[in-house]
Structures are given as C-alpha cells and as structure tokens.
C-alpha cells in the first residue's frame, strides 16, 4: 500500500540564524512551522501539530522564558493552528487516528490538544524526558502538551504505523533525547519528513548543527542516516527551511 501526504504551514516563527546553525553569522531567519497529514487506507495520521493558540495571548504559559526571548511569535495568526488548517481542507480534527510526535518542543507538539481522539506515537526516550519535570524543564518541554488524556503508544526504534511498511517512524535522536522522523511510501516514491533532526538543507550538506542540541554525536549520526536515505532515492522534506518550503505544495494539493 501507499499513502498520501499533505503539507500545512501552521504559521511562522522568526529567530536568530546563529542559534539554529553554528557559524551562520548574525541576523534572523523566518521559520515555517509545518504539520503533515498522512492519509492511508487504514487511517489518518499527523506528523506534528504545530503551535498552541495560547501563544497568541498567553505565550508565557506555553514556552520557556528563553524561547520567548529568542523567537518572534507574530507570524502565528488566528487561523494558523492545526485544527483550523485541517478544517480549511475539509478534514475533521476529531477523526485523526494518530499523532506521530517528532519531539516535544512547542512548535511541533503544541497543537496536540486540538486533535482530541488521536493516539500519540512517541519514542521512549522522548516520553521519559517529558515525564520528568527536571529534564523537561531543561529541554524546554511543556508537559501540558501530553496531558490531554490521549492514548499514548511508546515505541523504541522503528515503528511501522499501519503494519505494511508504508508509514514508518524511525529514530533520529540528538536534537532531543527521542526525536523521530517519518518515512512514507507514496505513489511517486519514498518521502522522509525530517522534523528537527535537520532544520535546513544546509544542515545536511554542511553538517552545521544548532547551537544547543541534546547529543551532538547522535544528531550527526542521524544526519548520516538521512543522507543515506537520500542517496537511496528518498525525497527529504526540511520543514523549517524557508527557501525549500517555498516550493512545497500546500494542502489540499498532495505533497506527492
């Protein structure tokens, strides 16, 4: 079987490029915030859910003081949350079966609560980190993003979501303890959603990591894995790369 992918831009952040890629110099960069809808004959899944609407009115309740200082949130508009994006393409947010959580930062899991009936699919190291208040605080995680009563499927390593090899989450640790990317088999070939294991195309080509990462060696190994997948014919999707994102078809048009 194959699946379809639909890309949704759930607003933008603006932040210092030098924090996101070492040695990149001064100046800020605009960051698209992606969520991806995956439709499969056996169900629907989201890979990441973007940001929570409270960021527009009460940002201090959703993100850390450091993140508030780093990022300009003005690019997150009233219709940029994942629920609004789904409704705009005639998809019911209550009929999403799974949320594949790349990791627990606010711009990737903040919209979890807007998708009430899904099962969260989370790598075990990420779940352990967000469940420990001290670790979560150090990593900038908000435990509230997983406190909505969702069923949680904790996985360790690769996870075949529908059991047919078409939608497979796989570990790309390093950015956070349990970051995961997603490999999707479409009618036009394999697509890999990199999440924050690879912010930009240049991150992969130049091996310039963000200034703050959980585990540098693990993140470099994850980049090696992504590069191998690309050389094997997979199409990599760099979610925060503005120049790359300009050419990404937006829902309701399928990505591939």
Image: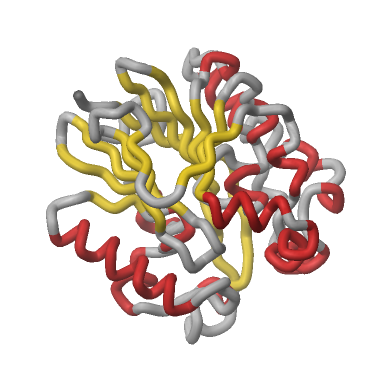
Residue 169 in the image: x percent, y percent?
38, 44
Establish if 146 lies above or below 93: below
The image quadrant of residue 115 is top right
Residue appearing at x 27%, y 27% in the figure: 3
Residue 141 in the image: x percent, y percent?
70, 55
The image quadrant of residue 5 is top left
Q: Quadrant of the N terminus?
A: top left
Residue appearing at x 74%, y 68% in the figure: 138
Establish if 241 lies above or below 234: below
Residue appearing at x 55%, y 28% in the figure: 119
Establish if 61 lies above or below 229: above
Residue 35 in view (yes/no) = no
Q: Looking at the image, what colour scheme do you see?
A: secondary structure
Residue appearing at x 16%, y 29% in the figure: 187
Q: In the image shown, does 49 or 128 lie closer to the viewer?
A: 128
The image quadrant of residue 162 is top left
Residue 15 in the image: x percent, y percent?
63, 66
Please indicate whether residue 36 sits to the left or right of residue 210 in the image: left
Please indicate whether residue 43 sits to the left or right of residue 12 in the image: left
Residue 173 in the image: x percent, y percent?
46, 63
Q: In the image shown, does 172 or 251 lie closer to the viewer?
A: 172
Please indicate whether residue 175 sits to the left or right of residue 187 in the image: right
Residue 22 in view (yes/no) = yes
Q: Quadrant of the C terminus?
A: top left
Count up the numbered dots.
Answer: 0
Q: In the image shown, does 10 or 122 lie closer to the viewer?
A: 122
Q: In the image shown, does 180 or 53 lie closer to the viewer?
A: 180
């Amino acid at each position: 079987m194959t699946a379809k992918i639909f890309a949704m831009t759930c607003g933008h952040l603006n932040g210092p490029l030098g924090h996101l890629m070492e040695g990149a110099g001064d100046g800020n960069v605009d960051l698209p915030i992606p969520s991806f809808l995956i439709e499969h004959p056996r169900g629907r899944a989201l890979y990441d859910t973007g940001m929570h609407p409270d960021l527009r009115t009460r940002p201090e309740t959703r993100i850390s003081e450091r993140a508030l200082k780093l990022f300009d949130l003005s690019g997150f508009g009233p219709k940029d949350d994942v629920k609004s994006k789904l409704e705009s393409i005639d998809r019911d947010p209550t009929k999403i079966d799974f949320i594949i959580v790349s990791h627990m930062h606010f711009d990737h899991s903040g919209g979890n609560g807007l998708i009430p009936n899904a099962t969260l699919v989370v790598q075990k190291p990420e779940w352990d980190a967000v469940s420990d208040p001290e670790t979560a605080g150090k990593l900038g995680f908000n435990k509230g993003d997983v406190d909505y009563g969702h069923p949680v499927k904790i996985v360790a390593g690769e996870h075949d979501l529908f059991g047919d090899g078409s939608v497979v989450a796989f570990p790309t640790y390093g950015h956070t303890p349990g970051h995961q990317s997603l490999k999707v088999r479409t009618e036009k070939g394999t697509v890999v959603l990199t999440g924050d294991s690879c912010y930009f195309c240049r991150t992969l080509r130049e091996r310039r990591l963000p200034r703050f990462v959980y585990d540098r060696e693990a993140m470099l190994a994850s980049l090696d894995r992504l590069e191998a997948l690309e050389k094997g014919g997979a199409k990599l999707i760099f979610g925060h790369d503005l120049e790359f994102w300009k050419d990404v078809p937006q829902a309701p048009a399928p990505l591939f």
